[in-house]
């Protein structure tokens, strides 16, 4: 999965690692089957891609960048992209709302179980090194 995350913007045919290639190829798939490019659904999507999908959305929410191009989360009923950086608490709420549609509910559940102290440490570390 780490290789897939590192290579996420690479051309799929140029990635020499089969597992990483599969993760990269499926990173835009939504859990409910509405993603692209192949319309994979649920467990048809490699678990690494399901995790990566949530990680990129989290990064988008925390930094204020558009979430995964045109296939982002429908953050509001108006279907507009989310371009305002939000707190980790707001990001958790948005991701939880998209559980079962955009994200694998098991991945969301594991994500939501990360203790608040871990988030505080990560944010402090990012601020220190950013």
Image (cartoon, helix red, strand yellow):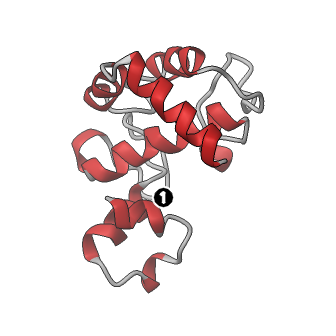
Rendered-image quadrant of the N terminus: bottom left
Residue 92 horizontal/vertical position (percent)? 49, 19
Secondary structure of the residue carrying numbered label 1: loop
- Is residue 81 positioned above or below 38 on the image? above
Determine the residue positioned at 72% across, 30% down. Answer: 82
Residue 59 horizontal/vertical position (percent)? 58, 40
Q: How many labels does the image show?
A: 1
Q: Can residue 126 be seen in this view?
A: yes
Determine the residue positioned at 39% across, 27% down. Answer: 118
Q: Is residue 45 visible?
A: no
Residue 8 horizontal/vertical position (percent)? 50, 64
Decide which of 125, 31 is in the foreground and name it: 125
Residue 79 horizontal/vertical position (percent)? 70, 26
- Is residue 37 positioned above or below 119 on the image? below
Decide which of 117, 80 is in the foreground and name it: 117
Give the residue furthest to the front.
128
Decide which of 105, 77 is in the foreground and name it: 105
Q: Is residue 47 left or right of residue 28?
A: left
Determine the residue positioned at 40% across, 81% down. Answer: 15
Q: Is residue 115 left or right of residue 130?
A: left
Q: In which quarter of the image is residue 64?
A: top right
Determine the residue positioned at 35% across, 60% down. Answer: 2
Decide which of 83, 114 is in the foreground and name it: 114
Q: In this view, does 87 lie to the left or right of 4?
A: right
Q: How crowded is mark 1: few (under 14 residues within 10 Å), some or many (20 or more)?
A: few
The residue tagged 1 is 37
């Amino acid at each position: 999965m780490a290789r897939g995350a590192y290579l996420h913007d690479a051309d799929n045919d140029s990635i020499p690692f089969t597992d990483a290639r599969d993760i990269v190829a499926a990173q835009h798939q939504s859990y409910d089957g509405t993603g692209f490019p192949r319309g994979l659904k649920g467990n048809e999507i490699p678990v690494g891609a399901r995790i990566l999908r949530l990680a990129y959305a989290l990064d988008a929410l925390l930094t204020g960048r558009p979430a995964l191009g045109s296939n982002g989360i429908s953050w509001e009923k108006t279907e507009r992209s989310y371009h305002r950086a939000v707190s980790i608490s707001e990001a958790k709420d948005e991701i939880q709302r998209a559980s079962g549609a955009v994200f694998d509910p098991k991945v969301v559940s594991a994500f939501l179980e990360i203790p608040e102290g871990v988030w505080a440490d990560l944010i402090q570390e990012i601020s220190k090194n950013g």
